[in-house]
Image (tube, rainbow, N blue to C red):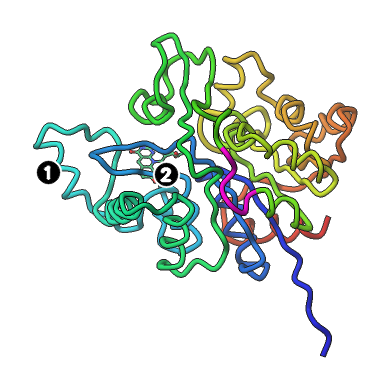
Amino acid sequence: MPVQIQQKIAALGGGVGASKLLLGLYEVIDPEALTIIVNTGDDLVLHGLKVSPDLDIVTYTLAGIVDPLKGWGVRGETFHALKRLAAFGRPDWFNLGDRDLATHIHRSALLEEGKTLSETAESIRTALGVKARILPMSDSPVPTIIESNEGAMHFQKYLVKRRAQPVVTGIRFAGADAARPAPGVLEAVREASRILICPSNPLISIGPILAIPGVREQLRARKTAVFAVCPIVGGKSLKGPSDKMLAQLGYEATALGVARLYANFTGTFIIDPADKAQARAISELGMKVEILPTVMKTRAEKRKLASALLAL
Ligand code: FO1
């Protein structure tokens, strides 16, 4: 019998936006052939616990337990512990549910026992039955710091506590220069037959991954195999404040604006039919342009985009 060679796929992404495409991929390929490299710039320590929102969003989505309306947290979640924490005077602006807290307690306990963030991610995804590999971008903390008219603050404080209201003047990935990619990250990019950049915020979801030394160079070396799905459609973010952040930092909040950020490591840039008028300008940046419906509301649309990307 011929040996079936499974094509490996690597995907880079953040949380909610990425998870839509990742769920589609997970359902149309052998999930064991998929390695997902996840942004951990959003990670924070709350109540003494290490919280890794994007790792958890991806894991919960693929495990089928994510809250489908919010896109983060666990479906049918309760918040008894958070209410009690608030009664103790602890901050409750970041909504950690009771079931979700178990993940953070487990992760924090493993880290305390000397395990790496990669090992904690592996423990959580296998316990929840996820067959794809889920890797943090790095085992070292690289918090995303937003500089704004209200001063510098952690990304979650900007997004959740301050509801993306401060005017962004800069973004820093603290400690990125000294960080190393987590084990398996560079290998996954090197060995994949295709590398997908998920439709995530280019500045604060993909940006932190690219800031880890060696990642951008490894992508550049595989440029023709890199396919990036644009997270801006018709000048608006598919999810979250990407459009606003791009504009405040002086980038164009359009498909072309994102394409300029990705041009030096991306072979094929995927835009929605709504942006087809920009195809020519994007191709002049030295990338192939493909036009596919990128707005994924239903499970069928997620699978359809995933299959179409693999067929390009
Ligand atoms: N997003 C919110 O807008 N409000 C929250 O209270 C909140 C809590 C939360 C808890 C766990 C988790 O894994 C994610 C959570 N998120 C929350 C989402 C998260 O802040 C962002 O969407 C991602 O970090 C960006 O990808």
Q: Quadrant of the rendered structure where residue 208 is?
A: top right
Q: Is residue 179 left or right of residue 12?
A: left
Counting from the top left corner in percent of width and height, residue 145 is at 46, 23
Task: From the viewer's perspective, tell me whether residue 223 is left or right of residue 258.
Answer: right
Identify which residue, 1 or 288, lies in the foreground: 1
* Mark 1 surroundings within 10 Å by alpha-carbon count, few (fewer than 14), some (14 through 19), many (20 or more): few
The magenta segment is 180-185
Who comes first in sequence, dot 2 or dot 1? 2
Answer yes or no: disc 2 within 8 Å of ligand 1. Answer: yes
Please state, as top left, top right, bottom left or bottom right, where the C terminus lies in the image.
Answer: bottom right
Q: Secondary structure at mark 1?
A: helix
Q: Secondary structure at mark 2?
A: helix
Q: Which residue is mark 1?
A: 84
CA gap, disc 2 and disc 1: 22 Å
In the picture as drawn, the residue positioned furthest to the top comes out as 149
Q: Residue flagged by tag 2: what amino acid is it?
A: Pro
Q: Are marks 2 and 1 in contact (CB under 8 Å)?
A: no
The reply to whether the magenta stretch includes residue 154 is no
